Amino acid sequence: MPRASLDKDPHEVAAMFDGVASGYDRANSFMTFGFDRRWRTTTARVLDAKPGEKVLDLAAGTGVSTVEYARGGAWCLAADFSVGMLKAGLHRKVPMVAADAMCLPFADNSFDAVTISLALRNFVDTKGALAEILRVVKPGGRLVICEVSTPTFAPIRFLHRRFLLKMLTWVGSRTSSNPEAYSYLAESMLAWPDQRTLGEIIASAGWTEVEWLNLTFGVVAIHRAAKPL
């Protein structure tokens, strides 16, 4: 079965996630020791989606995050490049659409907010995707990104970098039909920029009011930004 490389060819990434879709949510919870649920809850609070709003949950996978964001009454759409991931989430009661983050099939100014959870690092062009997302968000609308980041406490940062690849490879070998996919996930985490650098990339794509919140000692961070009026 395929695994993507750090070149992040979109077809390789989609094929890789298609191959692990059936067990992805279970493996994700296992390898994060259940923290993924806490991260989703906090992301939902930061997003603060309200009734009457339209929210795009981009790279939503099976839609587990979309369900969380829709609890407040907003209309939330799950979009993903991996059709296999969407099919694995068809039992969830949220609308779904196959979509490429680099060329979104939506009109300008369509959404009040866009959110991405633990998936931005899989996009082939981070700044390009952020600029395309900006296009479909209404003026004054918001962007909320939950993504892996750099632990702020030096001992945790050392352990995180030293053992992450080994741990995810071990998890993948026991929970997935494609263990090599988890090697890619670990490599993509280790190659991902820190909090400030990602904030600068977001700002360079045209977003304003960029700020971030560290979770779990900075292992994950939530970045929030707004589209200029």
Image (tube, grey):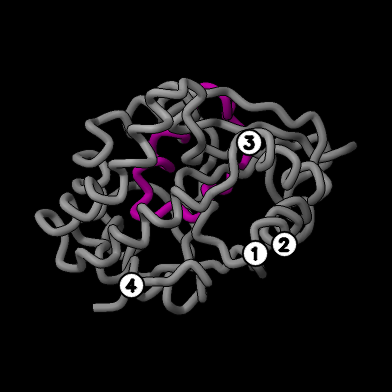
Q: What residue type is labelled 3?
A: Glu
Determine the CA span between mark 4 and mark 1: 18 Å
Between residues 150 and 41, which one lies in front from this camera angle? 150
| Amino acid bearing label 2 | Gly
Relative vertical location of residue 125 with respect to residue 12 in this rendering, above or below: above
Residue tagged 3: 53
Cα–Cα span, label 2 and label 1: 5 Å
For label 1, the crowd category at 10 Å Cα-Cα, with few meaning under 14, some 14 to 19 and many 20 or more, is some
**Residue 213, relative to residue 14: is it above or below?**
above
Residue type of the residue flagged with mark 1: Asp
Which residue corresponds to the image point at 58% horizontal and 67% vertical from the top-left? 124
Between the residue at mark 3 and the residue at mark 2, the CA separation in whole angstroms equals 25 Å
Q: Which of the two marks, 3 or 2, is nearer to us in this view?
A: 2
The N terminus: image quadrant: bottom left
Instruction: Determine which of the numbered discs, if any, sits on residue 128 in the image.
Output: 2
* Image position of 97 with respect to 66: above or below: below
Residue 60: x and y in percent read: 44, 52
Q: Name the residue under label 4.
A: 3
Residue pointed to by mark 1: 125
Q: Do the residues labelled 3 and 2 touch (CB within 8 Å)?
A: no
In the image, taking residue 200 as reference, residue 22 lies left or right, namely left
Query: Range of the magenta residues?
Result: 44-69
* Mark toward the start of the polypeptide (4 vs 2): 4
SS at mark 3?
Answer: loop
